[in-house]
Image (tube, grey):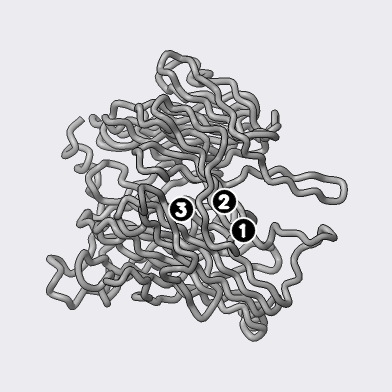
Amino acid sequence: MKKKSFQSYFLCVFALAGMAFSSNSFARDFYEFSHFQLNAPFNISQEPIRANILPNMGKEIIVIGEKNNIPQLALFAFEETEKQYKQILHIDLSNAYFGFDVSDENTSGEQSLYFLASDKVVRFEPSLKQPFVDLVNVSSIYVNQDADYLKQANFVTDLNNDGLSDVILSDFRSLNIYLNQGNSSFVKQSLPINPTVEIFDGSVSYTEKPYYLIDTNFDQQKDIVISGNGELLTFAQNNSGQFLTIAKSIPVNKQITSTNWWDSRGADGKNLDQSDFSHRSVDTLKDINNDDIPDLIVRFTKSSGVLDKSNDYEVYLGSKKLGKLTYNSNADTAIKSEGTLAQLDFVDLNSDDRHEVMASSFDISVSQIIGALLTGSVDQDVLIFALDSKQRYQQRISEQVQMKFSLSSGRSGAPVIKLADLDGDGAKELILSEDENQLKIFPGLKKGNILHKHSQILDIRLPSNGALLTSEDLNLDGKDELIVRYASEDGVDKQSRLLILQVN
């Protein structure tokens, strides 16, 4: 299918945004949106899966939900002859599956969809009469033969860059790697990485220990890294795809621990006293400044009481010294705000291969809590930080949205906070909910300021939970579409719908 014919489907104008931009740096004064709607044969319960699993042009849309208490899956693909997405498959899902994952794109841009059961991973092959094909038997901590729902999970990746999907899962004693050999066989290796175990009165909790796949010894191979106390522990990969079973230590700030503060326990088994403590733990490990060296991001929490807590993030820039990865004992830069930071996202906003940071900030003072109880909403600041010439993060953008909640239902309505390149110019737009029926869109800029100072208002029926609005470049034209689904609190008649919008 030709890309032009795919794009020609987006002909119906959904809205013309009302606020024109005053800057002459834009070729047009407003975005013009087209829309189309998908109707599933059941209520959709999960974020729609977008993956290029068929030879059709663009990505397919897979929706998951239930009908008559039976898990369901429907596959939609773009039909060139009818110039629209059409349902091409609707099947029941086994209760044995509780997780799914999508592989990375191969060299041809193709992907695969996988489902996880307690004892095996299966690949979804929609062209087959029996579309669930056993891939590999596995051992994991997930002992669940009758799942109530499916969740996105991370268990499929190409560990050794050979174009094949490998599987990585934790069991009760180790982290297991199933290396794909390309002939329907896998080689298993176990690393001595135990899950996190918490013992409560009458129960025990097992949680996969966070790990990072990143090159730590500059040999172009992905290594497996976990956090220790005052160190990073790295299991290096060799040229055959095997990992060393004895970890090497990379020293970091001695105050950095391997557990989050809310998981830490005292000698009596109880949570930490929040009246006076400070705590550092690893948030993520990734290259943020495009020097091909992984940088360390650490969550730094200080507390003088439940309602007097700061939550900042420290950045330790990685460096290569004598062929080894090293970090300073003190942070090179920090991300701070007057409130409590949460939801930190490192994103390249303007295609310069350097990561900006988008974060949410809350004021959790007594007065704010009382006000929230009275109004049913709380202010949430949306902040964007960028690296300056000295590789220090500086706050560049501050906007505000509202998070709403209901004391009767116990549910909160998250605002829309989204970054997406709607017009394909290489700069991401900031998309925020203005009220229940409006989006505010700030166009992204590739040079100078990160965002345009003016915004555009788009009228649209938003879901109560803003997290249900996602984005994806579905037709591979470089422009992200907005994908909107609705939950039960938005009305039963809307739960089977997907609304998809694209800038013309």
According to the picture, the residue beneath numbered tag 3 turns out to be: 285
Residue occupying the point 44% across, 22% down: 125
Residue occupying the point 19% across, 68% down: 447
Q: Please report whichever mark, 3 or 2, sits nearer to the chain's N-terminal start.
A: 2
Comparing 196 with 164, the one in front is: 196
Three-letter amino acid code at disc 2? Ser
**Local secondary structure at mark 3:** strand
Disc number placed over residue 257 in the picture, else none: 1
Using the numbered discs, state the Cα–Cα distance from disc 2 to disc 1 in whole angstroms: 7 Å
Q: Please report whichever mark, 2 or 1, sits nearer to the chain's N-terminal start.
A: 2
> How many labels were placed on the picture?
3
Taking 17 as reference, is 52 above or below it?
above
Q: Please report whichever mark, 1 or 3, sits nearer to the chain's N-terminal start.
A: 1
According to the picture, the residue beneath numbered tag 2 turns out to be: 227
Label 2–label 1 contact, CB within 8 A: yes
**Residue 288 placement (x, y as % from top left):** 36, 58
443 horizontally vs 260: left or right: left
